[in-house]
Amino acid sequence: MSASPVSVPSPSLFEAVVGQERAVGRLMDAARRPVHAYLLHGPAGSGKRAAARGLAAALLCPDGGCGVCNSCRRALAGTHPDLVTVERSGAALDVDDAREITSRAQRRPLESSRQVLLVPDVHLAAKVAPALLKTVEEPPPSTVFVLVADDLPPGLATIVSRCVQVPFVAVAPRVVEEWLLGRGVAAEVAAAVAPASGGSLDRARLLAEDSGFDARRRQWHAVPGRLDGTGATAVVIADELLGLADGALTPLRERHGRELAALEEQAEAVGSRGIPGRRAVDERHRREERRWRTDDLRMGLAALADAYRDRLVATVDGDATPGTPGADAERRTAAGHVDAVVRSSAALGRNVREDLLLESLMVELSGMLQ
Ligand SMILES: [Zn+2]
């Protein structure tokens, strides 16, 4: 019944990985002649975990990754007994997690000729890196490490140097858009969400489900028509826009709430009082909220720049004869608006105060009115 051994893993193992042709190519090569450890790293939401499961399927399948057998199916679903995933027990990987990884690495495979040890969130392992180093650089021959990290902090440098690295990139907006369309998201929503996703399928999915997203974008788009040349209106609008960014946090906060609930349940199950490392979890959540808020402001500024670009096109197509002084002045003003918005967007995230940034932008745009 079993087909003759295939040397090339089936591309279907990686069909859940979107817009990562180079990384997938490397993993397909890796599956044929595996070494002891791989490190898949790149932005959150870029498909690293799905890719890790695809690689595991290829390494565990008796036919080198046929994509259809029971072994492949269970590896892709994460239920294969020789695909061992060690999730961190607290906010970061701690000594207990490191101990579990080390002891799991020594275990013999149950079904397959090898076992795959998948460790997510390795960017949170800097503290225990020294404890992990020996196992990662020299596991038993039947163990293959697949480490996954969002970024590579300096504390990980030694571990990084012991692994074959597989970089993942932020997914291109066009690819995100197609992916959303494929999941039944309305075309208009997909087109709006994709550029605001920052190349993360995860963020794209949250935004597509966020009923307030479209309304926020519209409000930003409407700003040019509301500025009346007075500083008072400019300040009111800046305030409103900041409030919008706060409102955008709702879906993320819901997700954080679910995570805390799950951690609490785990803690109760092992009889621990409260979540271990709770403070660090809260800190990470705050960090994610800040980043999310900044990303949302950036999305808004992009919508605002679009609104001014529309005006620029309108002045070109409008009644004023090109080359006349009036038409040229209008065009210069519209182009100046776009520039000002793009400059502000670039300044975001450079440790500026967002309220002051928005206020001065609104005053500047308002002052450009004739
Ligand atoms: Zn198979």
Image: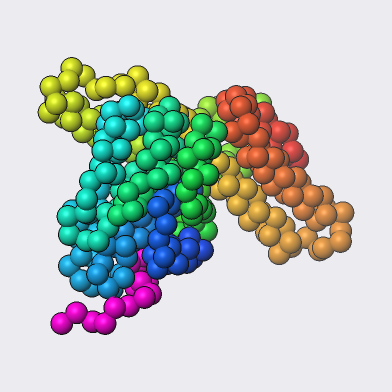
Residue 71 position within the rendered picture, expressed as x and y whole percent measured from the top left: 20, 65
For residue 182, what is the image quadrant? bottom left
Residue 268 vertical position relative to residue 364 in the rendered view, above or below: above
User: Which colour scheme appears in the figure?
Assistant: rainbow
Residue 11 magenta-drawn?
yes
The single residue placed furthest to the top in the displayed view is 273
Dominant SS of magenta comes to: loop
Location of residue 231 in the rendering, given as x and y in whole percent from the top left corner: 66, 26
The image shows residue 250, relative to residue 149, as above or below, that is: above
Q: Tell me which residue sits at (39%, 35%) in the image.
A: 132
Segment colored magenta? 1-16
**Residue placed most toward the observer, 290 or 107:** 107
Which residue sits at x=81%, y=63%?
321
Question: Picture coordinates of residue 95 (x, y %)?
Answer: 32, 27
Note whether residue 332 is visible: yes
* Residue name at image x 32 percent, y 62 percent: 59
Q: Nearer the viewer, residue 58 or 284?
A: 58
From the viewer's perspective, is 334 left or right of 225? right
Residue 64 is situated, as x and y percent measured from the top left of the image, at: 31, 70
Do we see residue 337 in this rendering? Answer: no
